[in-house]
Structure formats: structure tokens, C-alpha cells
Image: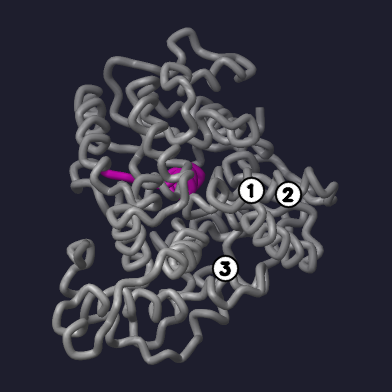
Amino acid sequence: MSNQDYSVKQLFEMGACTNCQVCADVCPAVSASSEGELSAIYRMKGLNQVLKSRAGLFRRLFGKRAPSEEEWKRFSNTVFRCTLCGNCQEVCPVGIHLKDLWLSIRQDMVHSGHYPKKIDMIRENLAEDHNVFAEDNEERADWVEDMEDPPDDGYIKEQADIVYFTGCTAAYFPLAQKIPIALAEVLEKSDVDFTLLGEDEWCCGFPMLGAGLKEMFEVFMAHNLSVIREKGAKEILFSCPSCYEMWRSHYPEEFRIRHASQFLMELIRKDRVPLKRLDLTVTYHDPCDLGRGARVFDEPRDLIRAIPGVRFVELPNNRENCQCCGGGGNLEMVDPELSAQIAKQKIEEILRTGAEAVITSCQQCVRTMLTYVRRNKVSLEVLDVTQLIRRALRQ
């Protein structure tokens, strides 16, 4: 057991924490559960104790012992019951890169053998089926068959300039499959030539990093790069912010990459998307990876405002301060109850705006919020911005 999972920069950053506790004030897991032990400040203290217990000098001078099994369990509890939303990093007054640190801690915990057993399931699913849900990867593009008028080629072409990288959630979950369907129909109406990868698309790698399984990523990245090169593509399109952020931060800069909201806004500016009037009051939820992660704030709002008749109201917590929906960081698998509690406080904030619908730009946000709304019979529509554009599409 060693500290090799951390960069030299991270080891220095750990000592910069001032214990100000601002991070705890914005943590969705803390506010939803009222458990202070889920805060970043608690996690930082626990990490420092772990690192010191491993250092020979500290052990000799101060008699530091290794954490007990119970202490490991408590630390693992705070490490993995986190949505990785990055709000703690956003408000950190000394600029510690906390989100990257949380990923390193998870990798450390896996190497140390102290992690939730669901991580083994995630590892097995990815290794065997190339997606995090253990679905048949040959069915990754089956959502095309649910379109009103599916093309004969299923949007899978030998060559294309643009690849639409669908992502695992939108590929397999019925609540989220409406998003790629909507996007494909808008692209079709706008005469955009694109291809899917179908069964050749593998998980982008984000669930691996979130599970502390970084070693698996290189194989998946190499595969995805290879199949996209074979298509002769120049650009990759994403409706999933986590896929987009993963490619933006961890893949080589070989292709032009854009989130669907950016691509659609460009089409609208070129008058390629004919829009009709919608009578609807909406608010917008910034996905963590698209907002705080990739700093894409304006294009989704511009899309909403481009639709005639739509009335837009901001959430009290918006843009970089937007509160997480509860669907990130593999939390839904590790602690579904906490994920639902975070979704509850998100929906309550949305309802206070008086909006009839909440719009987002993320399939996981749609799935998490819509699941809560339906289970609790809440009168609120939950849509991805691509679905909103599809609804406004003039035939």
C-alpha cells in the first residue's frame, strides 16, 4: 500500500486546505442527508490521516498506526457516496483541484481493497459487455428502431464526417432513449449527415474513473479512437455531458468535439432548424459535467430562448452554482436512496420557480429527475434541450 495514486501536485494541494468548510456548505450529499461525514472537509482530514499512517517517518516519530477496518469502512463511505459534481472545487478559496483528488482517492481505495462491492459489478460489466449496465453491446443502437421513420441503414454508415457518440445511458434506458431519437430527428430535418458506431461504440470511460478503475480506460479509449478513425470522421457529437467532458479532458485532441447544444445552436444560427411557437414556461438545470466541468452555460439557454413563445426563468442556483441532480459519480449504484434524496431537493428548488418544465442537457439528469417526478407523482415535465427543440420543430 502506497501513495502512488496521487500526483506530486495533489500531495502539495492537500496541505493547502484551510479547513474553512465552505465546501461542506455547497455539498448536495451533505444537504440532502444531513451527514457531515460526506463533506469534502471530512474527506480531506481522513485522507491526510491515511497518507501519514503510510509514511515511515511519521510512524516512527509519532507512532501512527494504519487505519482499522472500521476506519477504512467509514472513509470509504464518504469517498464513494459523492456525486463528483465539483461544486466543492468551484467554491474552494485556495483553488484545490478537488474533483481530480476525489478520483485519485477512489483509485487508491480500490487498490487498497476498501470499496463498495458494487464496484466489482461495474468492473465486470465493463469488461464483459463494454458498457456499465451489462447490456448486450450489439443492441447499443436499437433505439433507432423506435423512431417514427427509422432509416434503412440505422444511421450506421461506413464513412461520415460526423460521429454521434450516443453514450451508455441514452443507448439503453427507455427514459433516456428519447434524447438520441430527438437529436437524430432534428439532424435529419437539418440535412446533417452523421453516423452512429453501433456495437463498435464502447463506454467513454467516465464510469471507470468514477469507480477507481482507471487502469481499464486505456483499452476503451484506444478502441473508440480506432473505430472513429475508420469512419474517416472529423467531428464527434455528444448529447451526454460526461462523455463530452471525458473526451475533452482525457482523449487526445484528434477530432473536433461538440456537445449537442453547441451543434444545434450553430444550426439554428444558420437557419437550418425551422421552429414553431411553443407556449411553455421553463427553467434550466445546468448538468455538472457540462456546466462546471466544460463551462458550457450559454448555448443551452440560447436554444431555449430561440424558440418562439417559450418563457424562461432561471433557478436560484444556476450556471456554475447549479445544484446536482443526484445522478453523478456512480452514486445511483452505490447509494440509490441518497441519490433520490438529492433529486428531491433539486425538484423542490425547480418547483419554487413556477416553471411547467425543467430543461437540461444531460441524459442522466433527465433520467434521475424524471424517475423522482414519476415515482412521487410531481406535476413537472422533465426534458432534454434536444427534446424541446424536437417538439418545436416545424414539420
Query: Which residue extends farthest top?
Result: 152
Amino acid identity at mark 1? Thr
Q: Earlier in the sequence, mark 1 or mark 3?
A: 3
Please name whichever residue, 295 or 174, is drawn nearer the observer in this view of the structure. 174
| Residue 269 point in image, percent of width and height | 48, 48
Please name whichever residue, 55 or 137, is drawn nearer the observer in this view of the structure. 55
Q: Earlier in the sequence, mark 3 or mark 2?
A: 3
Mark 3 Cα shell of 10 Å, populated few (<14), some (14-19), many (≥20): many
| Residue 291 point in image, percent of width and height | 47, 62
Query: Residue at left 39%, top 60%?
Result: 294
From what the image shows, is residue 319 above or below residue 332?
below
Residue 1 lies in quadrant? bottom left
Q: Secondary structure at mark 1?
A: helix
Amino acid identity at mark 3? Cys
Q: CA distance from mark 3 to mark 2?
A: 18 Å
The residue indicated by pointer 3 is 322
Query: Residue at left 50%, top 63%?
Result: 77
| Residue 150 point in image, percent of width and height | 55, 14
Q: CA distance from mark 1 to mark 2?
A: 6 Å
Question: Residue 339 magenta-drawn?
Answer: no
- Of badges 1 and 3, the one in the foreground is 1
Are discs 1 and 2 less than 8 Å apart at CB? yes
The residue indicated by pointer 1 is 368
The residue indicated by pointer 2 is 372
Q: Is most of the magenta stretch helix, strand or loop?
A: helix
Start-end of magenta stretch: 256-270
Please name whichever residue, 372 or 331, is drawn nearer the observer in this view of the structure. 331
From what the image shows, is residue 388 above or below residue 280?
above
Are discs 3 and 2 less than 8 Å apart at CB? no
